[in-house]
Amino acid sequence: MTMLTLDSPTTPFSFRKTPAQRSGLHRLLTAAIVNSQFREKLLNEPETALAGGYLGQAFILTEQEKAIIKTVRAKDLTDFAQKVNQALKTV
């Protein structure tokens, strides 16, 4: 089983970003982890998931992050996180 570590200094989530700037991606993935309905929406309808936010709160993401999230197609959350991680490495 693959484990996603969000606080590791080598992850692209921290690449050139302060902790405050990373919070949007952290919140997005946390919402997907704790809420199965949001997770399914993120995997199947990412634009709708981003537009709706979570519990009334929008995700603060860069335009690049939004574009990546909207184009990633994944079978599950682990696959999604790996693909987003890989795409962010190339930015």
Image (cartoon, grey):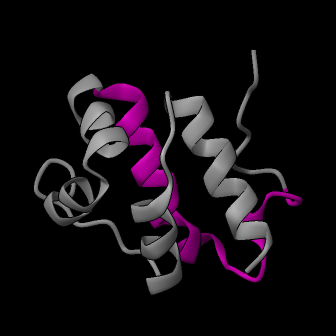
The answer to whether residue 22 is left or right of residue 42 is: right
- Residue located 79% across and 74% down the image: 90
The answer to whether residue 26 is left or right of residue 58 is: right
The answer to whether residue 49 is left or right of residue 18 is: left
User: Would you place residue 20 above or below residue 56 in this image?
Assistant: below
Q: Is residue 12 magenta?
A: yes
The answer to whether residue 11 is left or right of residue 77 is: right
Q: Is residue 58 magenta?
A: no
Image label count: 0
Q: Position of residue 83 (x, y in %)?
A: 65, 49
Judged from this view, the residue extending furthest toward the right is 10
Q: Position of residue 15 (x, y in %)?
A: 78, 74
User: For residue 82, what is the image quadrant?
Assistant: top right
From the image, which quarter does the C terminus lie in? bottom right
Q: Position of residue 73 (x, y in %)?
A: 48, 46
User: Would you place residue 72 above or below residue 65 in this image?
Assistant: above
Towards the viewer: 17 or 78: 78
- Residue located 24% across and 40% down the image: 41
From the image, which quarter does the N terminus lie in? top right
Q: Position of residue 26 (x, y in %)?
A: 51, 53
- Residue located 74% across and 40% down the image: 5
Magenta part of the chain? 9-35
Secondary structure of the magenta portion, mostly? helix
User: Would you place residue 53 above or below residue 14 in this image?
Assistant: above
